[in-house]
Image (tube, rainbow, N blue to C red):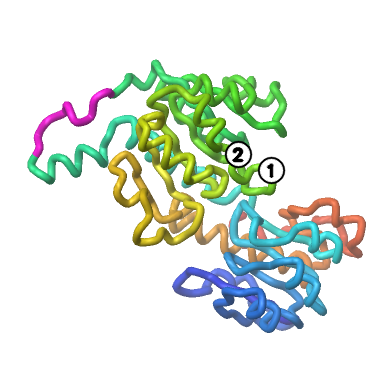
Amino acid sequence: MKVVITDFEFGDLKYEEKVLNHSDVELVYGQCKTEEEVIEFCRDADGIINQYAPISRRVIESLENCKIIARYGVGVDTIDIEAATEKGIPVGYVPDYGIDEVSDHALALIMNVLRKVTITNKSVKNGVWDYAVTKPIRRLRTLTIGLVGFGNIPRRLSQKVQALGMNVIVSDPFISEEVVKDNKATLVSLNELCEQADVISVHAPLTNSTKGMLGKDQFNLMKDGVYIVNTARGPVIDESALIDAIQTGKVSGAGLDVLDKEPISSGHPFLTLDQVTLTPHMAGYSEEAYAELRSKTALALMDVLVYSQTPKYLFNKNVSEQLSLKPFTEDSHYKNLGY
């Protein structure tokens, strides 16, 4: 069986090779960028591992043998889920990837924009020893943080900011009020969150309904001097609206790990705005998290191709009725790796 890795940003494939080291599996890999490259490379693949290359409807319709597609990560926005489901292809993902890493990184950005660490570091190195450049700074336990989305990562972040004394409000149409209350937070609408929050941290996945969900209308509702942090997906925020809000002072600071287009272009306005702290889409990274991510992504292919069972982590659950796979039961290959 042919397993294709469409693209990857790691220095090696040692974790994937370890998991897929099976007499019936042939592993090939490339660095596809376009639909045409993916089609040519994956046409006869039995299984596909994907990072950023487009797995579009056109790509999926070209696949002759594919029995499983798995993506490195929590998000699956590179894959046309509807097309995969129509063709009866299960899509694997890693929903528990980087929970601590991303929540830690979000917290680091929140602390940075609130305590003005990057701004004062630059100021001191430029010869200015004066805390006044930071004004105003607010006491954390007087502030309300709004979490847009309340999956595993923002729930972990909620615990961390509550330990600092912050009040937590949540907007997520797919989460019950009971779940939010159990996490000692308050469920509100998106508009209410925009009106009430002193800090807004974005954790929504990128879908057709979430693209640009924080736009001009939402920024107009926000408090003057609000802070924005995004460790989810860049296009969830209307970037031009955010730039306008920073330039007018509506937004006092932003910590962004993700952008509308990555990597950032040399002339991007964010590069000249001291109020903006940027990191290169690294929130999910730690050595331990990457080992787990890569291993679990490959394990999804073992589930289907070797054990003939539904993937342990299946995104498009409604595809199950089309499959001739057994329910997930065999987990020795996970346990052998400590997962």
Outermost top residue = 142
Q: Which residue is mark 1?
A: 209
Q: Which residues are magenta?
A: 128-136
Q: Amino acid at mark 1?
A: Ser
Quadrant where the C terminus lies? bottom right
Magenta-drawn stretch contains 193: no
Q: Name the mark on residue 122.
A: none
Name the residue tied to disc 2. 213
Q: Is label 2 in contact with label 1 (beta carbons under 8 Å)?
A: yes
Query: Which residue sits at x=64%, y=67%?
Result: 54
Amino acid type, label 2: Met
Quadrant in the rendering for residue 218: top right
Quarter of the figure with residue 182: top right
Tell me where residue 146 appears, x and y as whole percent.
Answer: 52, 27
The CA span between labels 2 and 1 is: 7 Å
In this rendered view, identify the residue nearer to me: 333 or 135.
Answer: 135
The N terminus lies in quadrant: bottom right
Where 67 sits versus 113, above or below?
A: below
Residue drawn at x 59%, y 56% is 73
Residue 154 versus residue 197 in the image, above or below = below
x then y, percent, for residue 283: 45, 50
Instruction: Kindly state the secondary structure of the residue where label 1 is placed.
Output: loop
Instruction: Inspect this view and state whether residue 57 appears.
Output: yes
On the image, the x and y values in percent for residue 332 come to 71, 61
Residue shown at the point (36%, 50%) measured from the top left: 269
